[in-house]
Each structure stands twice: as C-alpha cells, then as structure tokens.
Image (spheres, helix red, strand yellow):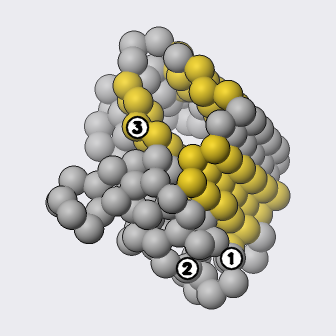
Amino acid sequence: MTIERSTFSGLGQCDETPDCAHSVYLANTGTITITHSRFERGRGGHYVKLRAPHVAIDDNSFDDSQGRKTNYAIDLPEGGTGEILRNTFVQGPNKENWTGVIVVSAEQRKYSAAGLRVADNIATLAPGQKNSPAFVANVSGDRLALGANRLGPGVRAYEDRH
C-alpha cells in the first residue's frame, strides 16, 4: 500500500469516543509506504499508526505546532522493520501524549523491529512545548539502526522502554 504526495490536515479526534482516531491508521501483511506527504494540525490520536511487518516512511513533514490532543507522530504499535528517513518533525505544545515522536512496539511485539532504519530526520519542538520527548522510543527489545538525525534542544535521541 502506498500513500504519496498527500496532505492530512486537521484529522483525528479524541473528544467523542474513548477510542481515538488517527490521521492515517493502516494494517496489512506486506509493506506500507508513505512518501512526500504532509501531516499537520492533528485533532487527536497519532499522525501515522501502522500495523505492518515492513514500512517506508520517507520525505514527509509532520507539523504538530498547531495540533491538539495528539499523540505520536509515528506509531508502529506491533513493531516492524524498514525505514524512516528524511522526515521533518515539529512537536507542538498541546499533546495528549508527548513522550515520543516515533514509538516502536508499544502494544505488542508481533513483528520484528530489528534493523529498522531511522536516519537523516529533523525533529524540533514548537514554541511552548516544554516537555522533552524521546525522538525514538523503542519497546521492542530489538536493535534498531539509528543513524544521524538532527534533533533540536529538548528532543532526546533515544529511549529504551522494554
């Protein structure tokens, strides 16, 4: 499945039901690719939540500076390998869950995350964001392939949560 050159703006909600909606929420048994797309002004949930064994999330923009009640920019709740490359992330101040920008295997370890490549990304905090999120929070226990990422003040590079 591929998403390319798309804009997701003002999506998600957490006010009406206990189950939050997300800007993109997909599951399959193959590869999910998201490229050259923009995510902005989220209204709840995660910007991208993928349940797949292989992902390619490259060359996207995640601007949460005007989001509200949002969670992670990228959630791989069951793990997964592949790549997260050349994306730009801005984490805003009105988060429901600010603890991680990219979170791996927060719900279960269905897919191996060994070798998931996260490199050449930029992550900063928007004015007013006073918390210090982990850029990558890894619950999987697998060794990820973390490359050079440019992180602004207050963004911690990595947190092992297993």
Q: Where is residue 4 in the image (x, y as percent from the top left)?
A: 67, 28
Depth check: 76 or 5 in front?
5
Depth check: 125 or 3 in front?
3
**Which tag, 2 or 3, sits closer to the chain's start?**
3
The amino acid type of the residue labelled 3 equals: Tyr
Residue 156, quarter of picture = bottom right
> Which secondary structure lies at badge 3?
strand
Residue pictured at 39% horizontal, 13% vertical: 29
* Residue neighbourhood size for the residue with mark 1, other residues' Cα within 10 Å, grouped as few (<14), some (14–19), many (≥20): some
Which residue is identified by label 1? Answer: 126
Residue pictured at 46% horizontal, 54% vertical: 11
The amino acid type of the residue labelled 2 equals: Pro
Q: Position of residue 60 (x, y in %)?
A: 72, 42
Residue pictured at 66% horizontal, 61% vertical: 63
**Which tag, 1 or 2, sits closer to the chain's start?**
2
Q: Which residue is situated farthest in the top direction here?
A: 30
The amino acid type of the residue labelled 1 equals: Ala
> Which secondary structure lies at badge 1?
loop
> Which secondary structure lies at badge 2?
loop
Q: Residue 25 carries which label?
A: 3
